[in-house]
Amino acid sequence: MPSDPVCRLTGTPLTVVLDLGRQPLGNGFLDPVDFDSEYFYHLRCGFAEDSCLFQLVEQPSPELMFHHDYAFFSSTSRHMQEHFAAFAEDIRDRGYVDGDDPLVVEIGSNDGIFLKHFSADGVRHLGIEPSGAVADKAVESGVKVCREFFDVALASRILDEHGPASVISAANVMCHIPGIHELAQGIALLLGDDGILVFEDPYLGDVVRLTSYDQIYDEHVFLFSALSVQNIFRTVGMELIDLVPQATHGGSMRYFLTKEGRRVPSPTVQEILDIELAQGLDRTETFVELAERVAASAVTLRRTLEEIRAAGKTIAAYGATSKSTTIYNYAGIGPDLIDFICDNTPLKQERFSPGVHIPILPESAFRMSPLDYAFLAAWNHEAEIRSHNAPFEAAGGKWISHVPEARILD
Ligand code: JHZ
Ligand code: SAH
């Protein structure tokens, strides 16, 4: 018998609030020869009121998800390239790299989308990135990379070799790391006494607001709020000093933290904590209600696609996202409803989507096929995708989205 699930921070019993069923790896794009040996796990989410942490009950091992063939390349979106250029500029404008020979360490540096802006200016930096192909790209753009998983032992080695970090940054990776207390300990160890930790991740408040349940997949072992981030870092003597909501990845939050008492927290911190309490991000009941909306959303999306199909129309999907793996496998949407998915990532093309095995083709296939409908799997990149696919709309093509509710877009 598996033991009852407990919170990954506090060890208190977890209330299971959402069950998304049997799921493959979110980024497990595969060839037909591997269909029979595909890995599956049970995707369930729990909530703990003492930590306010929304978390997966079971997560595949990090090595299964992050390896040489890891298929998500951050720079595949022009908008995200601009976002990380502006992020680097914000760190500079805030004066965080003004000191004598500052060191910027990034956890999960991927293809160097963020650190290349420091490398270009000769700022001392180090990216921590265990996935090989993306790390190769970063090195090509002049970024120094340590190809390991960040943990306390690595933090200690980096401290010995390079000294304390002025800035530790992370985007879309803190919520991927299951040993959350150890992660916080490693950060507190490596960060200089006046250093800044700044990270951003998909925001729990937006998932609740938009019913964007596709943010839940193997890699996202947590969905954070300011309340839970405060609880995590309190255990290592760190505090929130600022919060800046972001529109990226369908709604994210950027968190700024220091060691306790080093800077005066911005009033925004308390304002956002109060909004979260009013939204119920500290209460199990909020997530029980979310689960009801998730079930209804999946049924509506599937029915919408079935009706279009029954009318003899063609449907493609735009973006072989990790997020959509959850939708397809939970809602039961496969090649019978979606002809193909298009994506600009060479590593995903000519492969098949995880679990339901929809073929993945380059974006040129989208432009060349006469299509009636397209599911916006990468809904977080809607503006960018629509801007370079105007001919699809001009020819009468219609987009389908599932956020904030499943529908055909006007
Ligand atoms: P996108 C990944 O999520 C995984 P995913 C990870 N767990 C995470 O947290 C976030 O990223 C940060 C393609 N595309 O960004 C590129 C086009 O083809 O929504 C990508 O494959 N044409 C680390 O996978 C996909 O769509 C385009 O014009 O859900 C988008 O993936 C654009 C803009 C994108 O992340
Ligand atoms: N920061 C980028 C990349 C996010 S993808 C962005 O926001 O676009 C998450 C990245 O974190 C992957 O490249 C993965 O290999 C890496 N990663 C996962 N676990 C890690 C860990 N423990 N330490 C460092 N990097 C990790």
Image (cartoon, helix red, strand yellow):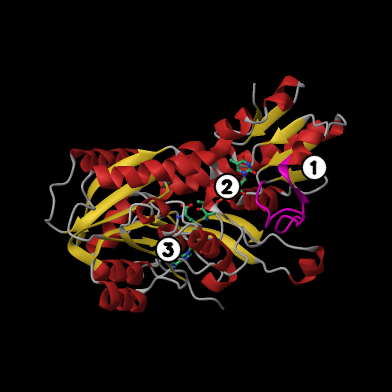
Image quadrant assignment for residue 26:
bottom right
Q: In the rendered image, is residue 236 in sight?
A: no
Q: Residue at x 46, y 37 (%)?
A: 209
* Labelled pair 1, 2 in contact (Cβ < 8 Å): no
Query: Along the horizontal axis of the image, is 103 left or right of 260?
Result: right
Label of residue 337 in the image: 1
Callout 3: 10 Å neighbours few (<14), some, many (20+)? many
Image quadrant assignment for residue 155:
bottom left
Could you give the CA–CA distance between mark 3 and mark 2, rounded to whole angstroms?
A: 37 Å
Q: Nearer the viewer, mark 3 or mark 2?
A: 2
- What percent of the width, then of the height, locates residue 375? 69, 37
Q: Amino acid at mark 2?
A: Thr
Q: Secondary structure at mark 3?
A: loop
Query: Along the horizontal axis of the image, is 63 left or right of 350?
Result: left
Q: Secondary structure at mark 1?
A: loop
Residue for badge 3: 14
Residue 361 in magenta stretch: yes
Q: Nearer the viewer, mark 1 or mark 2?
A: 2
- What percent of the width, then of the height, locates residue 84? 42, 45
Q: Examine the residues drawn in magenta and state their main secondary structure.
A: loop
Could you give the CA–CA distance between mark 1 and mark 2, rounded to whole angstroms?
A: 26 Å
| 236 up-or-down from 49: above or below | below
Residue 18 in magenta stretch: no
- What percent of the width, then of the height, locates residue 320? 66, 49
Q: Which of the image's four quarters has the C terminus?
A: top right
Q: Nearer the viewer, mark 1 or mark 3?
A: 1
Residue for badge 2: 76
Q: Secondary structure at mark 2?
A: helix
Segment tinted magenta in the rendering: 344-363
Label of residue 11 in the image: none
